[in-house]
Image (tube, grey):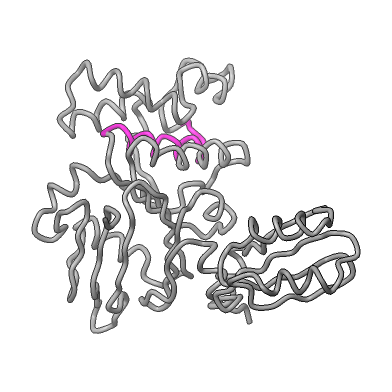
Amino acid sequence: MSETLAISAQGLTKRYDGVTVVDHLNLQVKANEVFGLLGPNGAGKTTTILMMLGLTEPAEGSVSVLGFSPTREPLKVKRQVGYLPERVGFYENMTARENLRFIADLNGISYNEANQRTDEVLKMVGLTESEIMEALGPKRKIEKTVGKFSRGMKQRLGIAEVLIKRPRLVFLDEPTAGLDPKGINQLLDLIAALPKAGTTVVLSSHQLYQVQRVCHSIGILAKGKMVIQGAIDKLGREALAGGRFQIEVETENPGEKLIKVIRGLKGVLGVEAKGNVLSISTEADLRRQVSKAVVENNYPLIQMKIQEFSLDDIYMKYFREE
């Protein structure tokens, strides 16, 4: 049985004044995952998001969002999708609660339900009344309008506005911009928890370590084309290790007998010994089989690890700094 897709795009293309900014893009995002959309400025990330939201039409190709066409059924998409742009706008003479109540009203949420959801999302993003008063300081306790908020507080309010209609899919464009380290960690924890509540996330960010922390899979755009897409660990092996797994085992004085046994395991491509460490190249994750071979041959298993790949390493393979 195939996995449910929240987004499926085929041959998606967009041109402005004869210039192709998104070029026959194929993209798949699984339901209930955090998907990282990466690429340098001008790669086509924002234009791709706008096409998926139905805010601009593709020149060619098609895209399905939650089973609907953003071009033919934009209202059905908008009812179930939230979008946080890089620059968020509010009614700055209103409070956070008043802004959220206004958004709830626009989305047809009843008065009582809106109150409940407002309390819920303000708590989620750390903007309860007591938290706002503490952040603004004693001189501003009376005046709590959004115009007095810091950039980080406004960013968190933007997340709250996205979540108040309980969307099945959200697009977040640089959501941690302007946040301090504590705020970044709180927001990343919130993003990571959204799929468990039934919300798929597409995260566009330049902060690769943040993407690696919360994303299940990624897609990297370059000049409007998708250059690589998939789970981070799988992409690392494919892009940097020729599709192989690399397992390191530390034991005591590994002899030729042990090396021969490990070489004989199905899926092992090669074994190199450097002192007490065996470097084992395999077709699959064979840590269980390797550890069993070590122990059954009366060698102590001091340490075992599998090579992990940094998203920075994968990204820089395609975008070398000059």
* Image quadrant in which you'd find residue 110: top left
* Image quadrant in which you'd find residue 258: bottom right
Please give the name of the residue rendered at 13% of the width and 53% of the height, measured from the top-left corner: 74
Quarter holding the N terminus is bottom left
Please give the name of the residue rendered at 57% of the width and 20% of the height, measured from the top-left corner: 134
Please give the name of the residue rendered at 67% of the width and 64% of the height, measured from the top-left corner: 307
Please give the name of the residue rendered at 31% of the width and 50% of the height, measured from the top-left corner: 31
Q: Is residue 229 above or below residue 114?
A: below
Q: Is residue 73 above or below residue 48?
A: above
Q: Nearer the viewer, residue 153 or 73?
A: 73
Q: Position of residue 253 (x, y in %)?
A: 91, 65
Q: Is residue 157 magenta?
A: yes
Quarter holding the C terminus is bottom right
Q: Could one spot residue 6 in this view of the protein?
A: no
- 30 relative position to 263: left or right: left
The residue range painted magenta reads: 148-165
- 281 relative position to 152: left or right: right
Q: Is residue 8 above or below residue 175?
A: below
Q: Is residue 2 magenta?
A: no
Q: Position of residue 229 (x, y in %)?
A: 42, 68
Q: Nearer the viewer, residue 18 or 43?
A: 43
Q: Could one spot residue 294 in this view of the protein?
A: yes
Q: Nearer the viewer, residue 121 or 248?
A: 248
* Image quadrant in which you'd find residue 164: top left
Characterize the magenta stretch by its predominant secondary structure: helix
Q: Position of residue 265 (x, y in %)?
A: 64, 70
- 151 relative position to 248: left or right: left
* Number of marks present in the image shown: 0
Outermost residue on the left side: it is: 72
Q: Position of residue 46 (x, y in %)?
A: 35, 62
- 261 relative position to 205: left or right: right
